[in-house]
Image (spheres, rainbow, N blue to C red):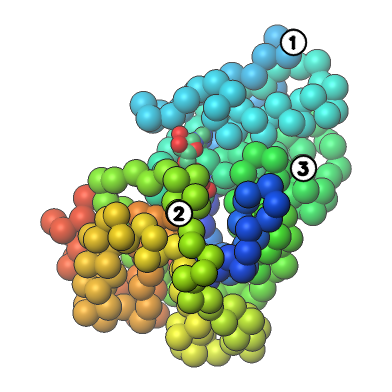
Amino acid sequence: MKLQEKAPAKINLALDTPMRYFDGLPRWDMVMTSVDLADYVTVETHQQPGTIRVFTDSCYLPNDQRNLAFQAAHILHSRFHRTDGVTIRIKKKIPVAAGLGGGSSDAAAVLRALNKIWQLGLSQGELARLSLSIDSDVPYCIYSQTAHVTGHGEQVDLLPAFPHYWAVIAKQKISVSTPAILRQINYEQIKHLQVDKLIERIKVGEWADTFQYMGNVLEPVTAAQYPQITKIKDRMLRLGADAAQMSGTGPTVFALCHNESRARRVENGLRGFCREVYRVMLL
Ligand code: ATP
């Protein structure tokens, strides 16, 4: 049996970390949402026992157990003692190592697809719990809807969708290593966000009032190495974006615009200045 799943990119409306756990990983306090920039993941089961194969159209990605989509298939395959094999084909549209959670979203898509193909009957919460060992963003990507994400990433509380906003996403030709950025967080120096206020505004639908509470405490860490991040963000705001900030550990910067013509202006104003620019709707 064969199924195709859409795997949308995520952006962080808020990214904060109050502390590091004893295992060295950050405790997260994030608000995430997803955009209509997506990979397409086709999952097919076959009779060759035990084999998991991954094919992608990107030369930057591993096809073996290092691929997060492979790891997702392996988790369900071993836990449910499946004897059939799995072939995964990924059409990559989300830039890699960009802070857009592309690998995590591919993994979540594989989990959703195999849950249906093998009729495992797992709830979204159960899939999210199983997926945390792959990457901290995978539990969120099981849902790919606006949510407050805490803990190691496993606590996902859904929020109302952000309606009718455009995102202009700008990815420069640099790849950022997430573990390297996380190691550099200095907890003494973090200027924490008011994530609870952002959530309050989203819940009552006061969208225009949410922007002042957005933020990403990792932005100064990544921007210290890549000053272009701040330049792109300033340019987006000058071109009329309602809000602009870095997503995840970067280097991607996104602008939010309510108005389509404003979004086009931001998009056009970045072309020639930045290698990859996408204008998409928030989901
Ligand atoms: P995160 O912020 O969740 O760590 P990201 O959005 O910055 O992730 P990804 O595109 O998910 O970045 O890639 C991060 C790393 O994961 C890269 O080094 C990449 O080689 C590896 N990876 C493994 N599988 C995939 C996949 N299916 N798609 C993208 N990257 C993958």
Q: Which residue is mark 3?
A: 130
Residue at mark 3 to residue at mark 1: CA–CA distance = 23 Å
Q: Residue furthest left?
A: 272
Q: Secondary structure at mark 2?
A: loop
Q: Is residue 51 left or right of residue 65?
A: right
Give the quadrant of residue 30. bottom right
Dot in front, 3 or 2: 2
Name the disc covering residue 119, or none.
none
Residue type, mark 3 in image: Leu
Task: Kindly identify the amino acid type of the residue bearing the numbered disc 1.
Answer: Pro
Mark before the other along the chain sequence, 3 or 1:
1
Name the amino acid type tagged 2: Gln
Camera-nearest label, 3 or 1: 3
Residue at label 2? Answer: 184
The reply to whether dot 3 and dot 1 touch (C-beta < 8 Å) is: no
Task: Please give the name of the residue rendered at 62% of the width and 51% of the height, measured from the top-left corner.
Answer: 25
What mark, if any, has residue 49 been given in the picture?
1
Does the beta carbon of the residue at mark 3 sit less than 8 Å from ligand 1? no
Query: Which numbered mark, 2 or 1, is in the foreground of this view?
Result: 2
Lower position in the chain sequence, tag 2 or tag 1? 1
Of 188 and 133, nearer the camera is 188
Residue shown at 68% from the left, 64% from the top: 150
Is residue 93 in view?
A: no
Q: CA distance from mark 2 to mark 1?
A: 44 Å
